[in-house]
Amino acid sequence: MIRKIAVNTGGGDAPGLNAVIRAVVISALWRGWEVWGIRHGYRGLIVDDPNDLVRLERRSVRGITHLGGTILGSTNRGDPYHYPVEVDGTTQPMDVSGRLIERFKELGFDALIAIGGDGSLKLANRLLEQGLPRVIGVPKTIDNDLAGTDVTFGFQTAVATATDALDKLHSTAQAHERVMVVEVMGRYAGWIALYAGLAGSADIILIPEIEFDIERVCEKIRRREARGRHFAIVVVAEGAKPKGGHMTFKASKGEFSEHAQLGGIAQQVADQITARTGKETRSLVLGHLQRGGSPVTPDRILSLRLGTAATKYLAETDRSGMVSVRHGEIELTPFSEVAGKIRTVPLDSDTLRTGRDLGVCFGDEPAGTFLDGTMPPPPLRRYD
């Protein structure tokens, strides 16, 4: 029987985290459970600091649904199997997972609700296998790349932020007759680039799932020039790579980092466009703007649904897993279908096909090619 649960947030922040926390707390209190928040990932169970473990009541989560960030804090350096510990004046990686599980049980917790992305959920599953009583994961990432669910909270807000930026760039690109190359997040999946690019009427979208030929990109820009469209908007996912090339990293994986840091592909693409077409080209990296701000309405609703579903499955089943969205409905997906896996854009995706039918260049086919391989007729010339 569940009486006392803990909740934490790990990895990068995402709009909707606070809404999930609020949903977990209120729905758990309604069942008569105690709820405690672990601050900064698992630090509250590793470091003996009373401020890192906080009891959550209704007043703790009042008015936080619309707030970005997380009231519990987060970290990308919280892997308990590789935790930074000061030893003789130097920071060394140590496995503190046994201590974490022991303290979890000593404090009387019956279950953990872990809110996070692929790295956080992989850790939660590993701790579960090592002896943690129960774990329910809640899928969080703006990249929308988690396996086992159709969507993750935070994605819609990130897309809205990127789309708004593209809307603003159109006017300045057109005024100065420039090519604007916009780099968006997404790591090894192109969901943000694809959705924001389509919504923001981008002319070219480059995603990790499709290796791009820079000459195809330049061909699209030249064709626009020939039609009197002297500007272009290019959206490039941070994990996009040229044909036969590699992804671009601006920082390698650190000793305590979860991932190597992608970045720099927009500038590379911009430089090559200028060199090949002579067009004045600028690059812009949206970066962490996509993580911040208030969650949009779909993310708020999804966060609340997932948070309450997490407590529902704790109350009504004895299983662990991740609450996920499948065909619009909430399900409990086994960690074996989630841990260590990512979900990329399918090459037969209807959304991808929509872009091709609209004439968007993905860097792999001649600009303006229809799906059947034929070329569209030249535009009619208007005479006033």
Image (spheres, rainbow, N blue to C red):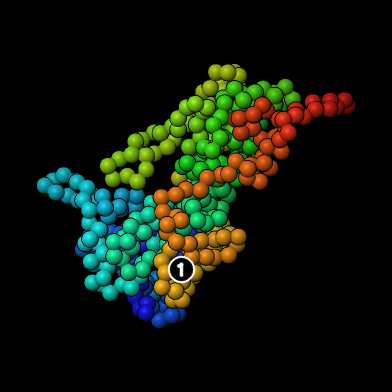
Relative horizontal placement of residue 150, taking residue 373 as reference (left or right): left
Vertical order, 302 against 222 (above or below): below
Q: Position of residue 168 (x, y in %)?
A: 61, 40
Quadrant in which the C terminus is drawn:
top right
Q: Amino acid at mark 1?
A: Ala
Q: Residue furthest bottom?
A: 32
Q: Position of residue 295 (x, y in %)?
A: 52, 57
Residue toward you, 383 or 188: 188
Percent position (x, y) of residue 346?
58, 44
The residue positioned 51% from the left and 40% from the top of the image is 184
Q: Which residue corresponds to mark 1?
A: 310
Specify the farthest residue to the front: 336
Identify the residue at horizontal 33%, vertical 57% (top origin).
Answer: 126
Residue 63 visible here: no
Could you tell me residue 274's position as x and y percent? 56, 21
Q: Is residue 68 left or right of residue 181?
A: left
Q: Residue at horizontal 63%, vertical 37%?
A: 202
